[in-house]
Image (spheres, helix red, strand yellow):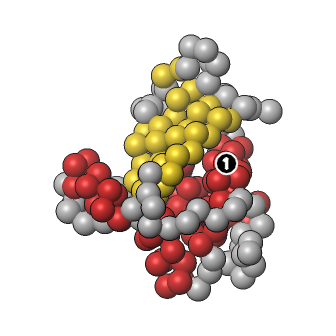
Amino acid sequence: MIKVKVNISNEQKAVKVPSGLKMLVRRACIATLVAESFPDSAEVNVTFVDDDEIARLNAQFRKLDQPTDVLSFPLGENGQYDVNPETGAKLLGDVVISLPRAVEQAKKYGHTMQREVAYLTVHSVLHILGYDHEAGPDRVVMREHEETVLQSLGLTRSSDLE
């Protein structure tokens, strides 16, 4: 079994991080890599931010002057990644999640914040692995992979973690 290290930091104060959310994010990262048959040990960084910070990052890196729910910053390209010399793990990239946006979207879509954050995590890790739903045919495939991973976590559309 591959080893996956998920570094999580909370850089926002707008939303209290519920008990168990960081563990769920770790599980979502690992489940995504397992579902995608990622062959190596890996490291992923996940940062929780507020809407102002994600809007700043979105403007800086995507030239979109607005908040968004999640941003992905892959560190590799075409399956080639830098390696942590201490652990041998592939450095996959960074996931940045706006927790206020996740709370808002959970209400909008009628599910828990936990499911929304897990979805955003899976979605972003798939981007880090090279999926691109905005340019190309990956949209449907990516959505199917997201649902498969969420189901493996027990987060189907009809049953959420509470």
Viewed as shown, does residue 1 lie left or right of 86? right
The number of discs equals: 1
Q: Amino acid at mark 1?
A: Arg
Could you tell me residue 134's position as x and y percent? Answer: 36, 59
Could you tell me residue 50's position as x and y percent? Answer: 39, 62
Within the image, what quadrant is residue 89 found in?
top right
As rendered, which of 83 and 5 lies closer to the eye?
5
Could you tell me residue 116's position as x and y percent? Answer: 57, 69
Quadrant where the image shows the C terminus? bottom right
Name the residue beneath numbered marker 1.
Answer: 26
Whether residue 64 is visible to the viewer of this picture, yes or no, is: yes
Could you say whether the residue bearing mark 1 is in a helix, strand or loop?
A: helix
Q: Residue at x 69, y 40 (%)?
A: 37
As rendered, which of 111 and 151 lies closer to the eye?
111
Q: Residue at x 69, y 45 (%)?
A: 30
Q: Residue at x 72, y 32 (%)?
A: 3
Quadrant where the image shows the N terminus? top right
Relative to 40, residue 143 above or below? below
Viewed as shown, does residue 159 lie left or right of 32? right
Relative to 160, residue 70 above or below? above
Within the image, what quadrant is residue 156 found in?
bottom right
Q: Residue at x 20, y 62 (%)?
A: 65
For label 1, the crowd category at 10 Å Cα-Cα, with few meaning under 14, some 14 to 19 and many 20 or more, is: many
Could you tell me residue 132's position as x and y percent? Answer: 42, 53
